[in-house]
Amino acid sequence: MQPYEIYQEWLQNPYFDDATKEELRSIANDSNEIEDRFYRELTFGTGGIRGVLGAGTNRMNTYVVRRATQGIAEYILSLGTEFAARGVVIAYDNRHKSEEFSQEAACVLAANGIPVYLFQGLRPVPQLSFSVRHFKACAGIMITASHNPAEYNGYKVYWQDGAQIANEQANAIIKAIDLVPGYDSVGVCTLDQGGKQGLIRWLDERADEAYYAEVLKLSVFPDEIAPMAATYPIVYTALHGTGNLPVRHVLRELGFRAVHVVAEQEMPDGAFPTVASPNPEDPLAFEMALQVAKDHNAQLIIATDPDCDRLGVMVRDDAGEFIMLTGNQTGALLTYYLLSGKKAKISLPKNGALITTIVTGDLGPQIAKKMGVSSLKTLTGFKYIGEKIREFEETGAHSYVFGYEESYGYLAGTHARDKDGVVAAMLVCEMAAYYAGHEKGLLQVLHELYAEYGCYLEETRSITLKGKSGMEKITLVMNTLRMKSPVVVAGLAVKNVEDYLTSKVYEFSFVKTAGTVDHNQKAAWVACGDIDLPKENVIKLLLDNDSWVCVRPSGTEPKLKVYVGIKGTCQDNAKEVLGRVSEFMLELVEHIIKE
């Protein structure tokens, strides 16, 4: 069916409520809006569904949630009644309709005879991940759109190990959703019915206490930092999200008494009224926190995103001004703190492993190498780090020590299988207090790491390309780079091209004729190795001087993402090269789009 036909079907079908139909009638004269809302169905990205709230098959709404949950229920039931009887844990964040969507999902699962553990209030993503394992559930659902703007909501799916669903489960769930006859075919019970049948079970504070206990176990130097923690001034903002209670709880338990909260951003609010975007990667999200820091002479500012799986950090420089650390810088600092701390306490496993991703900087892995810890890279998305943790437990090949992404996600410990902003907040504050006790700031420690390992700088740029035409442009860029990869990027030679869609590594080579190089013939990229990772639409160029660039479509937003990693001789050199390479790549992408 064409978009307009589906639109008309929604208007005429008595299954859809009056509010939905009224919203659809309001766009009756906007053919572009009708097409955008109905030209496709929201599909699973890196671990679930995410989209703009509203009526339509390409929007987040009650009916999309019900249909997706029905597909998940069918898949779970296909794995056996004993498996399904383990139940599904459901949590939600502060976004518009999050509570409603969580209850809709619970009622669909209960209608299918699948037990549900349902939180009664906001909870962060890492606690959902932990709770799936704690309750030995078969799966978990988190209603969230992470750090997207206020008009978004989403639906993350977790599996029995507490990690986001792997490709195998995602593909099976997609097939199951496709087999659901229609939005109006999904059966739903009420919360009361599900409760009386013992299928919907409300979780209480005991679930929180179990999670907090595991988080606090991950402190490296709790006794050593105690004298400094009591007076060390910190500013924290939850950015209107779920982090307020859990982050403040663990900091208080660890002895931090001078934590100043940004009052205007403390309470949950899905409209995010004080920020343009509730993203701790964005310096603008720290504006209010900076004022509070000045008022209290704080040394550290931390911010968590709405579902509290990401952490942003600001520290003072030598001039006393606050600067923002990148995710790579915070990850490298935590790697050094955790590994050196465990080494000092003789608790660093002999087969320890650090896990990062193909778009994460290389300073952390270099630190790990020097400390005798292996480093592995996965595809982008913390679910792949979660998969590695499970693999280590099954094979014994390594012991997981730490993992992080450049996009402000970190996980110490294996209590959860997704990035944990609560743990990250605790460890960053502990680390800052620890080094303060040794008369060092975090920025000084970072510069010492640069002096020892080289100056690594990274940057991520995003190009927003919305709607159907945007998807087509993203496809054009990726296909063009795949067929016509540059040989030189801003003066740096391209040594190799890694194409994660073909799982091949390529090198630039002149065509050989009868064993000799014929320079009159056109040179070409020739396969020279394999990539042992799942296939994904990613192109990475390895440049001279251990630098690199990477291009990939976002799995959760209508964006093309361009990553750049530079190793410079000093900070000024690294900044200059970083800027030059970033601009080259952006101009290249814009040129392809305009062709």
Image (tube, grey):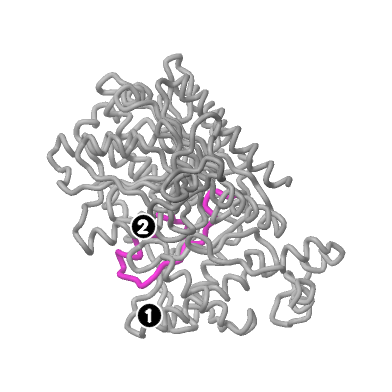
Is disc 2 placed on a helix, strand or loop? Answer: loop
Q: Looking at the image, tell me whether mark 1 or mark 2 is earlier in sequence order.
A: 1
Is disc 1 placed on a helix, strand or loop? Answer: helix
Q: Residue at x 27, y 29 (%)?
A: 434
Which residue is the site of mark 2?
532
Residue 142 part of the magenta segment: yes
Which residue is the site of mark 1?
84
Res. 137 visible in picture: yes
- Label 2 is placed on what type of residue? Asp
Q: Quadrant of residue 542?
A: top left
| Left/right of residue 476 with respect to residue 391 in the rendered view | right
Q: Nearer the viewer, residue 198 or 325?
A: 325
- Across and down, in percent, residue 134 comes to 30, 64
- Across and down, in percent, residue 325 comes to 45, 31
Residue 535 part of the magenta segment: no
| Left/right of residue 143 with respect to residue 477 in the rendered view | left
Residues in magenta, as a range: 120-148
Q: How many residues crowd mark 2 within 10 Å: few (<14), some (14–19), many (20+)?
A: few
Distance from label 1 to label 2 (Cα)? 33 Å
> Which residue ends up furthest to the front in the rendered image?
514
Q: Is residue 408 above or below residue 492?
A: below
Q: Residue at x 35, y 62 (%)?
A: 162
Q: Residue at x 36, y 42 (%)?
A: 424
